[in-house]
Amino acid sequence: MGRETAPVTGAASKLKPPAFLKTRRGREVWRYLLEALEAAKLDYRSALMSVAMLADKVEVWRTHADALHKIGHRYEDDSNGGSLELDESRAERRARVEILKDLDDAGLTTLAVAQIRVVDRLTNQGELFSPFELMNQIGEESKRLPEAPPWTMRPAEKRIWKDLLKSLDTVGFDFSTAGLSLGLMCAAITDWQDCKTWIDDHNGRVFATSEDTGRTYEVSASYNRSKIASQLRVLFKKNGMTVASCAKTKAISKGRVISEELEEILSFIQSRPV
């Protein structure tokens, strides 16, 4: 007989963060992530250190974001009338990429949560091949939205956050662990808008000409858009926010798509005579 993992209810608030999380915000982010995982009934007990490292990455990201907000802009004009991106802007965007790499393994995307839940149902049944109870549980996902993240958002980020929650309210997926993902999304969309603002403020300028060489080059506010779009594309897919990933998330929640091995197990379960 298999053994169910012990519940983690209420544990997050009692845990002491690792010593390397020296800032208050870093510790608050750590607890925020653990409480989200706990509310989603995911077992995070062996992942405390990796979640702490992720919280530290969030602290680095928001430090750059705060500095950028204090400056008030991402781009300055170069000597040719093109855009010159600030170092803080590039650092903030790179920090987002580092966080993005860790979201799935930490159970902090909608798609990952759907996969983890099906795996948990399989492993916690006891008799793996007397698993008809599983088929009754599949698809029973609760609709939940995330709590606001424990950092100060830019006004533009706050507006996007509100719009995101409104758009997700009727979807029916569990976004309770996706607060960090949506926070990254807000920052990336704001980054995209900053590119558009610079271009609009410069009469639609996408190219500039070097005074020294006479060669034409694409301004950074234009070519950065593909980098930002790539981040957003990944975030949308990971959280069931494209038409295709929405269908995939529903299928995973019903045990239809996980991996080849688990799909084979579920197929066997469904085909067995009662």
Image (cartoon, rainbow, N blue to C red):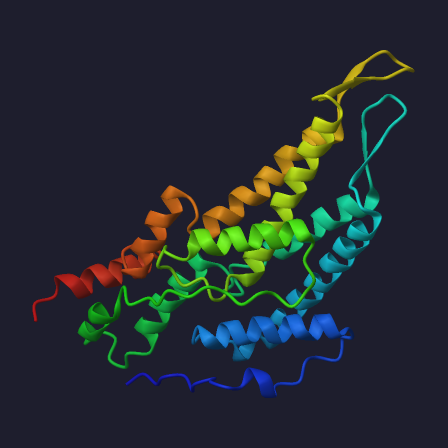
In the visual, does 201 lie left or right of 80?
A: left
Against 126, is 272 above or below? above
- Residue drawn at (54%, 76%) of the image: 35
- Residue drawn at (26%, 66%) of the image: 138
Please state the horizontal and vertical placement of residue 193, each as a whole percent of the image. Answer: 65, 38
Q: Nearer the viewer, residue 116 or 223?
A: 223
In the visual, does 268 lie left or right of 63?
A: left
Please state the horizontal and vertical placement of residue 44, each as a whole percent of the image. Answer: 51, 76
Please state the horizontal and vertical placement of residue 256, each as a whole percent of the image. Answer: 27, 56
Count of all numbered marks drawn on residues in the image: 0
- Residue drawn at (87%, 28%) of the image: 78
Q: Residue furthest top?
A: 214
Residue 182 is drawn in which quadrant? Answer: bottom right
Please state the horizontal and vertical placement of residue 27, each as a whole percent of the image. Answer: 69, 75
Quarter of the image with the C terminus in it: bottom left
Q: Nearer the viewer, residue 210 or 66?
A: 66
- Residue 260 in view, yes or no: no
Residue 162 is drawn in which quadrant? Answer: bottom right
- Residue 270 in view, yes or no: yes
- Residue drawn at (61%, 65%) of the image: 149
